[in-house]
Image (tube, rainbow, N blue to C red):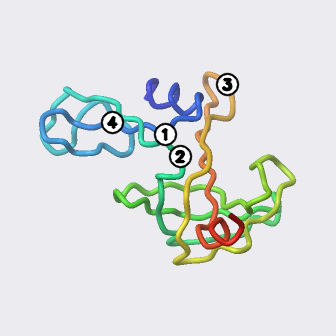
Amino acid sequence: MERFLDALSRGVFAVARCRSCSLIIWPPNPLCRRCLSSDVEWVEMNPRMDEIKGKAIAVADSHLRGARFALIELENGIRLLGRIIDEDDDGGSGGSDGSGAGVGSQVMMVGCGVDGGDDGSKPYYLFKSLSAYTSNT
C-alpha cells in the first residue's frame, strides 16, 4: 500500500500486477489473489493521464461540496470512486460540479493524488466527461 500511496502522492496512478500470472491486483495488495504469489510489480497506468478512460456506472451530487461524484469502471475493470469535474475546473474546492456527466458517460482521468497526512491518507481521483472534453478542444 505504501508504494501505491507514494505513486498517487506524485500524481501517478499505479497498480500491482502479478509477475507469475499477470493479474492486475485491485485493490492494491502485495499478494496475488489468483495464484497467491508475492512476486508483484508496480505498473504506472498513466504515462499519459488522458489514456486512462472508463465509464460512470453510478453518479451522485454532493450538495455539501457542490460537486458530482461517480463510481467509474475503467477499461481494465478497476472501479474507482472519483470526482467529475468540468473542463475549466482544477479539482479544488469551490470548483464546478461536473454536471455534464451522468450514468453511462465516458470519462477520462485527469488527476489523482493523496489528501491528508501519514495516518489519514485519502486517495482521490479526478475525471472529466469525454464528451465535454472533446467538444472544448
Q: Amino acid at mark 4?
A: Ala
State how far apart marks 1 and 2 are (Cα). Answer: 9 Å
Q: Are marks 2 and 4 in contact (CB under 8 Å)?
A: no
Label 4 CA crowd tier, 10 Å (few <14, some 14–19, many 20+): many
Of label 2 and label 4, which has the lower sequence position?
4
- Secondary structure beneath label 4: strand
Of label 2 and label 3, which has the lower sequence position?
2
State how far apart marks 4 and 3 are (Cα). Answer: 23 Å
- Mark in front: 1 vs 2: 2
- Mark in front: 2 vs 3: 2
The residue under label 3 is: 117
Q: Position of residue 124 (x, y in %)?
A: 61, 44
Label of residue 16 in the image = 4
- Secondary structure beneath label 3: loop
Q: Is residue 107 left or right of residue 4?
A: right
Q: Position of residue 64 (x, y in %)?
A: 82, 60
The residue under label 1 is: 13
Q: Residue at x 25, y 29 (%)?
A: 40
Q: Are marks 1 and 2 in contact (CB under 8 Å)?
A: yes
- Mark in front: 4 vs 3: 4
